[in-house]
Image (cartoon, grey):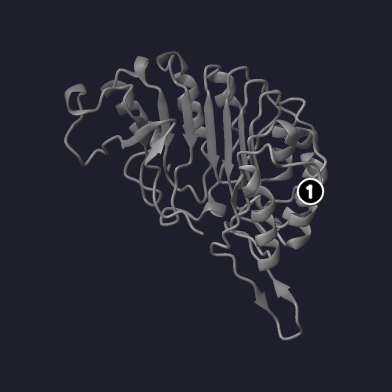
Amino acid sequence: MTIGSHLEEFHGLPAFTFPDTDDTPTDASSLPAPDSVAWRIAVDSYEAEEQWEEAFARFLKAVDTQQVRALIVGAWSDVYDTGPDEVIGALVAARDRLPTLRGLFLGDIVMEECEISWIVQGDVAPLLEAFPGLEEFAVRGGNQLAFPAVRHERLRKLTVESGGIPVAAVRGIADSDLPALVDLDLWLGTPEYGGDAEVADLEPFFAGSRLPRLTRLALHNSEIQDAICAALASAPVVARLEVLDVSMGVLTDDGATALLTGQPLTHLKKLDLHHNYLSAALRTRLLQTLEGAGVEVDVDVDDADADADEDGTVWRFVAVGE
């Protein structure tokens, strides 16, 4: 799976790209109402004529940012080589001009601009500290991503999309106090692309003590899906979930069987296992066991495909890597 198109909506609002310098000069009358869209601000990722901070400065002049509810940070210049430190600095400096900001997406960057594993990220904690009113925060790209432990009182949804989240960032998220969080979505990735977390690093998520309101947990897109499912089979957090997502990774019959033979899952609204390496028999068993209890079960193979060497070695792949 590749990411080939920009976000069409974010934080419940349609996405709108703020015009670049080649378009007609912007003024309030030619733009949407400030609170009606998620504003996407981006520059060319290669040989940009304008830096992201300059585009953001134009945005601050053209839009009544006191009413802006959601921002989408698109490509900045040389995203494959340069992190978003200047971008983050510009956003933090503008905190007082964005008092109603509730949704922030850092890195709405598609493959034609930069492959997901090549996106250079940075320390995102200053954004959460600068915007205590945020309810949704998402970041795409794991290369050099830093996420030290934070406490945020109002964040309800946290998403990290990546071909590989560094273990230090996973541990930082796991050690964060997020009392309002209801939705946690981590694309863990593979060691080849920096995703070096192990099941032990996910233990705080399984316990859920720092996430008292969590109802959706997605720990997916990894090579360790079987081990994750084995841990979830007895994890305290599962009992209060509505949605459990272990999709997009290397899930085999071993992991699915562990889920089925562990604690009851019939309270779930949805169990997402799409992009898997399950046998037909196991898929049928999952559907028969859980759909009858009212659980929506997604066992679609999707684009999961395995390769075999001449010596019989089988290679299985996650949905999103490079």
Q: Residue furthest front?
A: 292
Q: Residue furthest bottom?
A: 310
Q: Residues within 10 Å of mark 1 (few under 14, many from 20)?
A: some
> Taking 298 as reference, is 173 left or right?
right
Q: Quadrant of residue 156?
A: top right
Residue 184, percent across and down?
A: 62, 35
Task: Give the residue type that dot 1 points to.
Answer: Glu
Q: Residue at x 59, y 65 (%)?
A: 304
Q: Is residue 282 above or below residue 201?
A: below
- Give the percent coordinates (x, y) of residue 260: 76, 51
Residue at image coords 48%, 35%: 105
Q: Label 1 belongs to which residue?
A: 198
Q: Where, by quadrant of the figure, is residue 61 drawn?
A: top left
Q: On screen, 301 above or below 235?
A: below
- From the viewer's perspective, is 147 left or right of 77? right
Is residue 279 something one can see in this rendering? no
Q: Residue at x 50, y 56 (%)?
A: 115
Residue 117 image offset from top left, x and y in percent:
57, 53
Front in this rendered view, residue 129 or 315:
315
In the image, residue 287 sits, relative to residue 309, either above or below, namely above
- Front in this rendered view, residue 279 or 24: 279
282 left or right, relative to 88: right
Q: Residue drawn 51% across and 59% down?
A: 1
Q: Secondary structure at mark 1?
A: loop
